Every structure is written in structure tokens, then in C-alpha cells.
Amino acid sequence: MKKLFIYLGLLIILTIGSWVRLSGIISNSFAFTYDVGRDMIAVENIVVNHKVTLIGPTTGIDGIFYGPWWYFILSIPFFIFSGNPQGIAFFMGAVGIASILIGFLVGKKIGGVFLGLIFSAFISFSPIMALSSQIWSPSLIPFFILLVFFILYKLFFEIKSQTSKAKYLLLLGLLLGLIIDMGVVFGILFFLGSCLSLIFVFRKKLAIKGILFFVGGLLFIFSPRIVFEVRHDFLMTKTFISSIGNSFFSPKNFSIFDVFISRVVSLFDTWNAALAGQNSLVGIMLITFVFLGLLFFYKKMQNLEKQIIKTIFIVMTVFLIGLTFFNQGIWRHYLVGFPILYVFLVGLTMNRAWIVLKKSWVIFFIMLVLFWINLNPIRVLDNIKNPLWEGNVAVYRNQLAVIDYVYNDAKGRSFKYIVYTPAVHDYTYRYLFSWYGKKKYGYIPAKENTELFYVIIEPDYDLPFRLRDWLIAREGDGIIQKEAIVKGGIKVQTRITK
């Protein structure tokens, strides 16, 4: 009977987590931004044109690129779903759902079934982790971090054979390399924190053979970029060194203390978004609970729990120091893996309080309140009636509506098009015209000049003068026959060239 309730609870958690992640995909209301379009074009070049690349998208530093592994991973769902963005978004959602299961498995290994349910529930309900269905490389990082902790458990608390440990250290190197490829700032800092944990927390269980396998895993992930560097006279290396020389990693206009405080605020904001439903008061109360819980219960924790907590604090310290000396704004994806670390801290504290206080109903009540706050059923029901981002120009369903409008208006005639988008690059329309247009209507826009000409105009709310100037510059590009407002406020002009 006990097992029945456990698996029933896990099923409920999975069902809610699946709906939160997949509902927007089912309704085609997921984000389809210009960088997603860019990635889709790159993956299409790999899968369809068989042109394998050695580098991926550019990083925040001009001249430094990610590796190609994000493109390689996307190639799998691209091939399975024949380039359909909805299928690829479903793949991302499925990875998010798998994270819930892995969270349960890791929690069960570390502290038992109750901890597994806590981990899986937080991962399932947390609003910030429910965004894992976006076609965006940082969305894979929480999944990989869970695998890292699973491997750490297997390495140092279950496997005894040095040969088996070497294989798992190879996997650990591969995973840490992939995390760097999914988000360079987060990945590098997480890598440094993980390495310090291996040195200070797990050093007694490491062997030279295992370390070599670990380095081998990293080198395998970095090998495409190494080949690229050799072929291009170490372009990225030189750019990186130049960036350091230009004080990229040191504060310019603020004191170290001011920057440090701003980084603490960023970590706190992520804490609130991950665990407190964006409520600062709840966030402070939860931090207080964790602090007092660790203060009173740490000595009663098992060695495995202590090692995991030490690892988390080492990683967090590395991030705090690293970001303090990082002379750039902190984007959300720089901290994309932190919700997993926070979930582990809260979960381990709650689980130990539950055990020490002999399964007190107070702990159970606290968990239910937190799950309710994070899930926010009213918000979920509202999103069912009004799909997320329904009115946004970067929503997949709205862009499909534009493509459909153009083809239906053209009625089989050859046409050209031009797009004004605040993002400047029209990757999304380039991909959708080539994939969706050809698939549904049997042809793509012409490359040569045609009589029929469409102007697709996305609103520019932040800098409206750019759109005004752009339209003035194109007043002579054909005679406007009609104008329509499609979904998301996207305007389409039908023009006939003179």
C-alpha cells in the first residue's frame, strides 16, 4: 500500500509537470525567436545538406563560438520530426519531463523515497524550470546537472571497481564539457566548482587512471573547436586573450563590493523564481528555514548528504566570486542551473527535518504550501484559457499565421518578401518559408525579382523610429495594394512592383 501511494504521488507530479511543459507546445504557443530560427537553419544544413560544422553559435564575445554539440543534439529531433519546430519543442519538453524522473531517482539514492518526491515535485512545479520546453541550449543544463549528481553518487558511494569509476569519470568529463557548450558562463563556473569539489570533497576516492579518463571526456567535447582553432590560426584563443586585456572580467565603474552585492541579489532573485513563486518574503523565510535546518540537523545527516551539500556550497561560492569579477550584466541563462542546486539544498534540509522530527505534519504542510505557491494553479488554469505569449510576435503560432496569410493571398503566384523585425535578422521567416511553406504549399519564395511582393512588419515598441525610418527608405519598393494585421500585431503589406 505504501508503494502504491508513492508511485501515485510520482504519477501526479509527472502529470502536472508534463502538462505545464507540453500544453504550450500542443497549442503551438511556444517561443520561436530569431536565434531559434538561426539554429534551425544551421541544423538543417547538417541534416539535409550533410555539412558538418566545427563550431556552433557565437557567444557574448564577438569572435568566440560555442562548440557544435547543441546543433548535434538538435539534429536528433530534427531528423525524427522532419524539421518540424513543434516536434523539436516536444523533444525539449520531454527532456524536462525526464528531469523530473531523474530528480526522483537522485533524491531516492541520496536520502530515500521522500527526498525523491521532494526533488521531483520542486522540479515539476517550479515556474523557472517549467520553461525547459523552449528550443534553447541552456534549457538542457538542468537535465545535465542532475546527471552530474547521479554520476557523483555512483562514482563515490556505489561503485568500487576502479575500471568502472574510470568509465563514469569519462561520462562526467563529457557532461561538464556539454554544459559549457550549452552555456559558456554558467558552464565554465560550474566546471570550476565541480573540479574543486572533486579535489576537496572526493579527492580520497580519485585515482590517476580516472582523472585521465575525465580529461579525455572533456577533450572529446572540445575537439571540434580545437580542430577549428588549428585551422584558423587560433582565432578564438587570440580573441579571448584580447578580451581579458580589455578588462572584460573586471569591474570598471563600480566597486567590488557593489558588484558583489548585485550578484547576491541576482542569486536571490533566482532563488525566489525557483522556489518562492517570485515572493521575496517567502524566499527569505525559506532561506531562514534552510540556514537553521542545516545548523541544527547537519551533524545528523549521513556522509552522502554532507558531501552533496559541500559540493553545492563550493559551486555556489565559485559562482559568486566568478560573477563578481565578471564585467557584464547577468543574464538569466548565466544562472540557469542554480534552481537545481537550490532544490537540492531545500530538499535535503526538509528531508532531514522530516526524519529528525519523526515525520512531523508541520514539515509536510510547509512542503504543500511551497508546492502550491510554485505551481500557482490559478496561473495554470489561466494559461489554459489564454496560451502563454499569445500576443507576442515571437510565438510560433503567430508566425505560422503570417506564412499562411502570405501564401493564401498569393494563390499560387510567385512572390518575394522582406521582413522588418526588431531583432534585425529574419532567421525565423527564412526557415518557416523554406520548411513550412514548401511542405504545405509546395513552393518557396522566389529568389529573383517578382511582380508580387510582401512586406512583413513586426512592431518595434522599444525603438519605433527605426521602423518609421525603415518604411520611409522602402517607400519606392512597389505600390501597396492592401495591408492586414495578422496575429501578434504583425502587419503584412501586399505590394506590386513598379
Image (cartoon, helix red, strand yellow):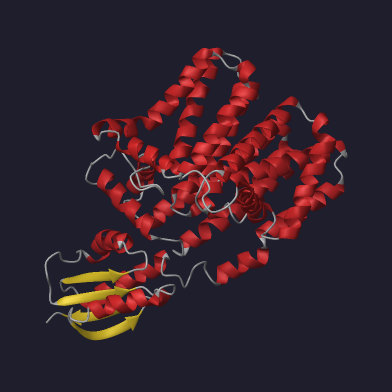
Q: Check the picture and name the quadrant holding the N terminus.
A: top right
Question: Could you tell me residue 114's position as x and y percent?
Answer: 74, 40
21 or 317: which is nearer to us? Answer: 317
From the viewer's perspective, is 381 left or right of 364? Answer: left
Q: Is residue 44 above or below residue 172?
A: below
Locate residue 257, reporting x and y percent: 64, 48
- 109 relative to 33, above or below: above
In percent of width and height, residue 179 lies at 48, 38
> Where does the C terminus fall, quadrant-wise?
bottom left
Identity of the residue drawn at 51% across and 28% down:
172
Residue at the image position 60 percent from the left and 40 percent from the top: 321
Residue 393 position by quadrant = bottom left
Of all residues shown, which one is farthest toward the bottom? 481
Residue 470 versus residue 78: which sits nearer the camera? 470
In the image, residue 272 sits, relative to residue 192, either above or below, namely below
Which residue lies at the image location 40% right of the left edge and 77% below the top edge? 489
Q: Is residue 306 left or right of residue 231?
A: right
Figure disc tally: 0
Residue 18 shows up from this direction: no
Q: Quadrant of residue 492?
A: bottom left
- Is 85 placed above or below 247 here? below
Report whether residue 350 is seen.
yes
Q: Position of residue 422 (x, y in %)?
A: 37, 68
Identified at 71% across, 59% down, the residue is 280
Left or right of 257? Residue 66 is: left
Comparing 465 with 245, the one in front is 245
